[in-house]
Amino acid sequence: MGSMVAPNKDILWDRVISPSLSRMSAPAARAILTIRLAKSEIKRFTLLSSRAKRGTLTENERAEMELYLDIGNLLTLMHSQARIALKRRRSRSRRKAA
């Protein structure tokens, strides 16, 4: 039996989540675009980032910062998919109207 390599996050995103998001409705896309980190979370991330630059992060803080980065990347990807879905819907609407 060949060895199985665990997929990285990008590959898993493309296989599992991205196809669902590409078929999202306009209201769902608009709702996703409203999801943001709270100001308190941004402040916390900024603090952790500053400590990382100084090399003073604890292991727990490093893990926390990695979670923030993962969440930020996920939100970026979701926002991108939502914008694409809205753009496709606008393009289809224009073609139907023409």
Image (cartoon, rainbow, N blue to C red):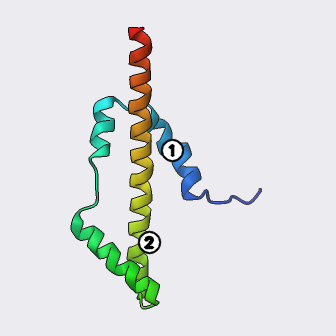
From the top left corner, tell me how far across and down residue 26 is, in percent: 32, 30
How crowded pointer 2 is (Cα within 10 Å; few <14, some 14-19, many 20+) is rated as some
From the top left corner, tell me how far across and down residue 88 is, in percent: 44, 27
Which residue does the image show at 29% across and 38% down from the upper left?
30
Real-space Cα separation, disc 2 to disc 1, in angstroms = 21 Å
Which residue does the image show at 59% across and 51% down from the upper left?
11
The answer to which of marks 2 and 1 sits earlier in the sequence is: 1
Q: Is residue 52 left or right of residue 41?
A: right
Which residue does the image show at 45% across and 84% down from the upper left?
53
Mark 1 belongs to which amino acid? Val
Res 71 quadrant in image: bottom left
User: Relative to the observer, which residue lies in front, 1 or 60?
Assistant: 60
Q: Residue 28 got which mark?
A: none
From the top left corner, tell me how far across and down residue 48 is, in percent: 36, 80
* Vertical arrangement, residue 73 with respect to residue 17, above or below: below
Query: Mark 2 highlights which residue?
Result: 66
Which residue does the image show at 34% across and 75% down from the upper left?
46
The C terminus - image quarter: top left
User: Relative to the observer, which residue lies in front, 19 or 45?
Assistant: 45
Question: Contact, CB < 8 Å: mark 2 with mark 1?
Answer: no
User: Relative to the observer, which residue lies in front, 43 or 78?
Assistant: 43
* Vertical arrangement, residue 54 with respect to residue 98, above or below: below
Query: Mark 1 highlights which residue?
Result: 16
* Vertical arrangement, residue 95 with respect to residue 78, above or below: above
